[in-house]
Image (tube, rainbow, N blue to C red):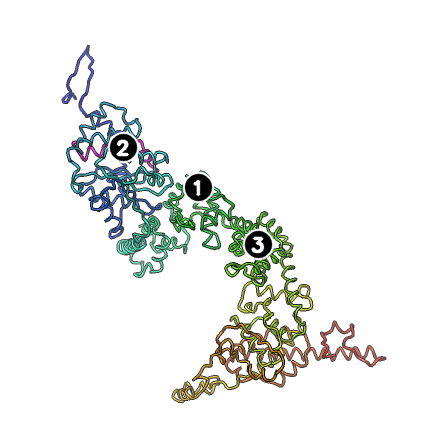
Amino acid sequence: MFSRSNNIVFSGGTFTQIEQNGAAGFDRLQKAASPGAFHNSGERFDSPRCHPKTRLAVLEKIMRWILGSEDRNALIMWLHGAAGAGKSAIAQTIAERCYEAKLLIATFFFARSDPSRNRARSLFPTIAYQIACTIPEARVQLENIINRDPLIFTRSLEAQMNSLIVEPLQELSISGYFSDPTLAPRLIIIDGIDECQDSRMQCKILEVISNSFRNHHLPLIFLIASRPEQDISLTFNSGSLSGLLTIIPLDNTFLPDDDIRLFLRDSFDKIKKTHPNKPFIPPSWPSSSTIYSLVEKSSGQFIYSSVVMKYVSSLRHRPTDRLEVILGLRSAPYDTPFAELDALYMHIFSSLEVLDPALLVIGLVLLGYHSDMQRISNVEEFLSLNPGDVTMLLGDLTSLITWVEDEHQTIRLLHASLGDFLLDKSRSKQFYIDPRSLHARFACHCIQMLPGKSLQWYTYRGILHHLSLSLPTTELRDAIISLSPTYLLEVVRVDATNDEDRHSRYPNNIYDFVHSWLPQFVKHITVLGYEDGSQLYAPQIAAYDQFMKTELEEYDVNTPHLNVLLALLCTSPSSKRQPDIFATTIYLLRWDRAAMHFDFDGLHFIDLSLGYSKDASLHFFRDFLQHTARSGIYAMDAEKFSRAALHCVRYLCDHLCQNLPPRYTGHDLEICRNAPWRWRKLISTNRLFRKRKRMASNQIPLRWDEIKKEYQGVSVVHPFPNFHVEWREEETRLEAYRTVLEHLPDLLDRASEYVFDELAEFIRKRSFSDASLKFPRRTKLAKKAIEKYLANAGQIDVRIEKAVRSYSILNAKDNTLSLSDPNMLHLFPVSESDT
């Protein structure tokens, strides 16, 4: 016990030991240090490190700086990146390399969950302990300093830095011990400084280090890795570190997706070679698309792929099943696959001082209709925030969310999996974003902004988007009630007239508003399921009906060509194909010269593009035409459908396209199959196969020159002067023929309630033209519809005959018979021509 002691005084059977060597000082230093912060600590046996052949570029850049071949004047390197970007793995790999090369002095790896590594009080004692172990010459000096001031570990960070690091190394620095950067150890690595609990102490550590360099010319270099938290970024960007600092951001410059892809492939290959369940794993597992999906989900951050591989490689489970859980193809039966990632997100969000507004901003970025709503200025305008509020609200989330410092300042999520976390209540708990409630809130914002010009490019589309996904809340119902469609109609009409930039917004004209926006708005209100839903959308329907009737007043209610067009829009084709009503209308009316006087240009309010549509616009228009209470005298009844059907049947029977290629007959199909040489000869001699005549916008095949000659002296208006489409005559004509065939069954079905002798007589005597051979299935359906119509017409004739006899008997005294008598109207429908 006393072998290494001296100056011992014995007094009365007791003794006092006075130690003047460094053993006590080093023991105190050992107790103040945190061994778990070492890069080779037993507590960090499973510490992350870079996968082989990954992160090569960034590792090489850091090593060049350490060896003095790059950025010689920079004494501090800040390696920063998003949460889970792989900073700790890079720091660990550099520490191991430099330790083997005798270049490493000390390391300190912060950890928020470890009480010995989440505070600044143990940082400098831990570094001092490693200095004493790495450089024996500095140990004696350290022991003397601690013996002189045993309470040095309770002093300020500045005092600890000066006493434990600066002073022990000053004499060595003067003697030239650190002159050769390739031989002398001088690297200190501090990782995860953002995980130090007190944000003020994070900045204080950086200030103490920078001041030591400026005041004492330390012979050391510091590699500091952290997330780009707001306070840390401000400290690094301050003037105190100018000239001392070099920065490496872990962004797309180093192509992280390629490294992640390599890591995933190697990890899956290892599973297929070493997993106990390997005989049951397909050789092609996983697919390239799965790898691509995982890389995209990683967003350049290694933590996602690392968590995935830890979960999939479990020895107690099937890797194929575990991967399906990750991909969302199978539910997790027991554990949570993203527990480690969720813990990281929970820690970061728990640091928020103002939670709800920050989640509202993130919700708009996640759920917004347009990517332009990710711009900070648009977010602040939409949510009625003051300029600069968004950056303040998201300041503590810079490791998860960033924004590009340009004129737009676009907000970008650094983790694609962050949205999955926030929208899953079982994972995010108190930070859960309810998408339906948030959509309802955003829809209210849109409705409040609709009358004005603020964010007009977003509000009209945004309200449709958010309404379709909203929860039916009381606030949303009140906002819908406050909306005046008549006022909006006038606003859009005025804006479309005065706004020079109307083509860049939606709706860009009054017809776009009526045909597209208004029907979808009503549809979404209906889907919300309010008890008084019909009262909510009644004003919108009334405004639509009034607009349509006002536009239709310019046309005669009995105009046959308008009637045919409306009938086609009201009927459905027999196939799932969406026909081109626009082209069909041209060819259906082209052979009727009276159509040349019809004002097709005035039909903007009908919007012929509805023929392509499956959405609410077409159904809304059909409901208007088929309800007398809404459309009045313009309602499509059985009589109008009958007259439209007659027009269509005449077209099908008197169609101009009679010279069809031989391929359209069954006989020639047999020739093609049994005698191909003869078939080729037929093709080479047939004009329709050799030459496809193309029609320009001013050459629509309407025999225009002939019509103008016949109407000399009369003002004739071309039906579609602005129709800019190139036509192939035969193909487009047959397309129109097919469309009419597809609509005829529905037309006849709707006309079956009306006795129209002219239609029945025509279809009994005439047959379809040869063009029908091209469409055998559709022709068969059309003929069945005709047979059904004729049978129904015969039954109606029998009913009429029986009714006439009964009426004659009852009125024997008066032999005159009038089918317009009110007593007979309930028996069958009657037209004026039948009377």
Q: Inspect the magenta stretch and tell me whether residue 731 lies in it.
A: no
- The part of the image, by quadrant, that contains residue 95 is top left
Q: Residue extending furthest left?
A: 3
Find disc 1 in the rendering and name its residue. 392
**Majority secondary structure in the magenta region:** helix
Establish if 749 lies above or below 19. Answer: below
Marks 3/2: CA distance? 62 Å
Under circle 3, the secondary element is helix
Residue 655, image x, y percentages: 56, 83
Under circle 1, the secondary element is helix
Question: Given the image, on which type of amino acid does mark 3 rest?
Answer: Leu
Magenta part of the chain: 112-137
Kindly check if marks 1 and 3 are in contact, taking CB atoms under 8 A apart as contact.
Answer: no
Marks 1/3: CA distance? 36 Å
Find disc 2 in the rendering and name its residue. 124
Question: Given the image, on which type of amino acid does mark 1 rest?
Answer: Met
Label 1 or label 2, whichever lies nearer to me, is 1
Q: Reading the chain from its start, which is encountered first: label 3 or label 2?
A: 2
Kindly check if marks 3 and 2 are in contact, taking CB atoms under 8 A apart as contact.
Answer: no
